[in-house]
Amino acid sequence: MYVDDDDDQIPNSYSQRPQVLNTPPLDDPEGEDDITDVKPKILLFGLRRSGKTSIRKVVFHKMSANETIFLESTTKLEHEDVSRNCFIDYVIYDFPGQADAFEDSAMDYSHIFEGKCALIFVIDVLEEYKDALDKIVMTLVGLDNKRLLDNIEVFVFIHKVDGLSDDQRAEALKDINFKVNDELSEAGIQINLKTQLTSVYDYSIFEALSIVGQKLIPELLSTFEALLNALKEPCGMDRVLLFDVATKCYIATDTESVPTNKYEMCCDMLDLVADVSNIYTTPECFSFYDSKSFSSVHLDNGTVILTKYICNNLTLVCLLQDSCLAELGLIEYNIAKFSQGMDDVLKSHFKRKPVK
């Protein structure tokens, strides 16, 4: 629990709160005082019509999933700068399905793989995916030959699973994992391949990209987990997540894993706040979020969902039981201390004042 040194500022009913950890320190290796200007990159690979561009448009441009059927196939390399806040701040490269980054000299993209990258292979699970698996192995072998693989996080999105039953999803996941890892092993490549089942018709694609984004900020992730745990445990919360409201990707959570149904509840809450607030505010996106934004929803099963805007498109979403609201003032106080701790960490890490 967060406690200020000045006890006079704390209500008497909270005087028995235990002391809590200070803001966890960030590593600051010698000679790394300045933040690099090179942004992290997300690289989307896959065969034609696998759904790469649909993912980009739905998550980062709020396109309706139903509209993606009208998107044309990508014929040339496309890239865009995505800057929502200090976490959602990277460059996305959308590779055409026919691109071969290592064999076609006219399309040499090897320089793009330098620096901090997340490489995502998108597989259309509704089609025969042998060629897609061959492309994964060929690309990873090419990266390994150029000694670029060590700095890259590799993901496989088994996409369009909305058209499959639960048993079919499990079978596809098992089959693809086995075949890719088997071929990579034969090629002498040992890699931690992370596989996700995704669809643009539900929240699975947002959840998958949340995990991708977290891999691009490893130096901050453990610090924010510690801060969220310091908020969660004393307040009796079940889960605490830090969301980017524009993309519905969560930046960090406490150390416990987040079940899919709870993640979906959080996303529904963000949508509800946006829909209701838009009735009373101007059409400008997210203009209803400010330092005073605070919302709560009570469910029939006794669960309460709280949202509190922190800064710079970042919102805290907390899941707790309604019995915890007996000390709502304590919860609000601790959230304010969390916000202060996060502000201190960002200033320390980025060497600049965070945007309010």
Image (tube, grey):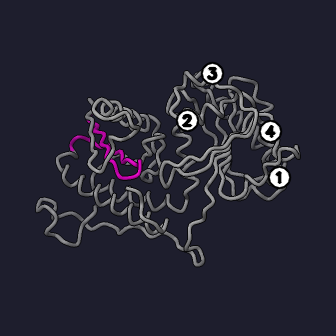
Is residue 350 found inside the magenta-colored segment of the image?
no
Q: Nearer the viewer, mark 4 or mark 2?
A: 4
The first of marks 2 and 3 along the sequence is 3
Residue sitting at x 20%, y 49%: 328
- Point out the tag, 3 or 1, that comes first from the N-terminus: 3
Marked residue nearer the N-terminal end (2 or 1): 1
* Proximity of marks 2 and 1: CB atoms separated by less than 8 Å: no
Check disc 4 and report the residue beneath it: 99
Q: Could you say whether the residue bearing mark 4 is in a helix, strand or loop? A: loop
Which mark, residue 188? 1
Note whether 299 is above or below 354 in the view shown: above
Q: Please give the label number shown on residue 47.
A: none
Q: Nearer the viewer, residue 324 or 337?
A: 337
Quarter of image, res 120: top right
Q: CA distance from mark 1 to mark 4?
A: 24 Å
Q: Position of residue 118 (x, y in %)?
A: 65, 49
Magenta-tinted stretch: 302-323
Real-space Cα distance between discs 4 and 2? 24 Å
Residue, disc 3 = 70
**Residue 279 placement, left or right of 127:** left
Label 2 secondary element = helix
Where residue 23 sits: x, y (%)?
38, 67
Viewer-nearest of labels 2 and 3?
3
Label 3's element?
Answer: helix
Calculate the distance from the C-alpha at mark 4 to the C-alpha at mark 3.
Answer: 22 Å
- The residue under label 2 is 205
Which residue corresponds to the image point at 31% horizontal and 39% vertical from the top-left? Answer: 305
Residue 304 magenta-highlighted:
yes
Q: Residue furthest bottom?
A: 30
